[in-house]
Image: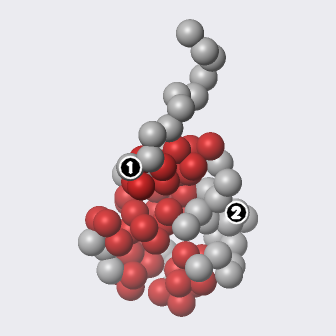
Amino acid sequence: MATASPLLRRIRQRTGEKPGAFARSIRVTPCHLSNVEAQRRPVSHEALARAAARLNVPVEVLIDGTPEAKEYAAWLDGTPVAPSGPAA
């Protein structure tokens, strides 16, 4: 089980996916999706993988606290992000 990043809701909304249809497409109930998006309940890695595939993003972007989630959030916000990896 994992805690989903707040990006799950933001990305889903940006794609125009409605909560009910999106929940069905990743095989969870709309109620569970709401709880996952609000970070009140954890989500299975399998459902998170299905959500990432549906939203066309790496699964790491949807896991709370990962560097990928932080970088993607900064990109969505238009905030410059220092490149990751070794310095040149």
Q: Disc 2 versus disc 1: distance between alpha carbons?
A: 27 Å
Q: Quick check: 61 above or below 81?
A: below
Viewer-proximal residue, 14 or 81? 81
Which amino acid does the dot numbered 1 rest on?
Gly
Q: Quick check: 70 above or below 5?
A: above
In the visual, does 82 lie left or right of 20?
A: right
SS class of the residue under badge 2? loop
Q: Farthest top residue? A: 88
- The answer to which image quadrant residue 84 occupies is top right
Say the numbered circle drawn on residue 78: 1
Which residue is identified by label 2?
2
Is residue 46 visible in this depiction of the protein?
no
Q: Residue at x 40, y 63 (%)?
A: 11
Which quadrant: the C terminus?
Answer: top right
Q: Position of residue 6 (x, y in %)?
A: 55, 67
Which amino acid does the dot numbered 2 rest on?
Ala
How many numbered dots are placed on residues in this image? 2
